[in-house]
Image: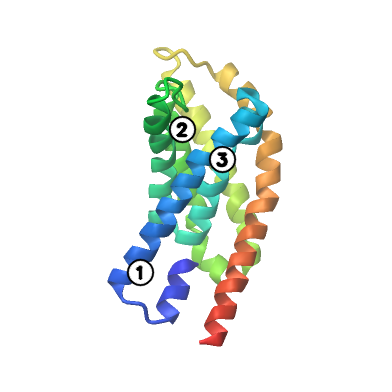
Amino acid sequence: MFENALTYRNISSGRKIAYKTIISASLVALAVILPQIVHLALGQPGGVQWLPMYLPVLIGGCLLGAKWGFAVGAASPLVSFIITFASGNPMPMAERLPFMMAELAVFALVSGLFSKKIADNGLWAFPAVILAQVTGRAVFLGLIVLTQSFTSFTAAMIWSQIQTGFIGLGVQAVIVPIIIIGLRKLLIREKEND
């Protein structure tokens, strides 16, 4: 979606990369900050229920497309881990980190595959987000099933956490598309004013 707006304005390749890098870094920063705020306000259970890191990742996929979104999704938990590790309370935990990196990369990749359709019609953001959520959570659960013999996670434990997160996923399935539709309208309005 963002790529289309930049192309329409005849932005050079170098400037496109610079703009996408700035937006990607901002979304990763938001993916680090939001969980901290939610954990301060609601504790660790609030993070499992509301899944605050997922929000900027889904926005990144829809807005930036599959490749850049994938990078935002994979980088968000890693950057969060590195920053919070220094405080002695890494989020996510080291053992959970590779699973979350895979899950969020899939979230952003799948939602990013819809980016061009969203550019044409913002309502595509709704199926994009829902399909991304289902696929990402399935990948997370599938990876746990494959590795539970040598990790401390079990499929039952992760399935319980997934069920707890249904509320957050439901809220994000509405909020993210509304944000994307709003951004799309803003980008279209700017195009019309050019």
Q: Amino acid at mark 1?
A: Lys
Name the spot of residue 162 as percent of width and height, x first: 62, 29
Name the spot of residue 123 as percent of width and height, x first: 66, 64
Q: Relative to 44, is 20 on the left or the right?
A: left
Residue placed most toward the observer, 123 or 190: 190
Residue at the disc numbered 1: 16
At 55% across and 73% down in the image, what residue appears?
Answer: 187
At 63% across and 65% down in the image, what residue appears?
Answer: 181
Name the spot of residue 124 as percent of width and height, x first: 62, 62
Report the residue that reaches farthest toward the left: 14
Name the spot of residue 41 as percent of width and height, x first: 66, 31
Mark 2 or 1, nearer chain start: 1
Residue at the disc numbered 2: 100
| Spatial CA span between label 1 and label 3 | 27 Å
Q: Are marks 3 and 2 in contact (CB under 8 Å)?
A: no
Disc 3, SS: helix
| Spatial CA span between label 2 and label 1 | 28 Å
Residue 184 sits in quarter: bottom right
- Answer yes or no: is residue 120 visible: no
Residue 7 sits in quarter: bottom left
Q: Amino acid at mark 3?
A: Leu
Residue at the disc numbered 3: 34
Dot 3 crowding, Cα within 10 Å, few <14, some 14–19, many 20+: some
Q: Is residue 114 above or below residue 192?
A: above
Q: Amino acid at mark 2?
A: Met
Residue 125 sits in quarter: bottom right
Please tell me whether mark 3 or mark 2 is closer to you in this view: 3
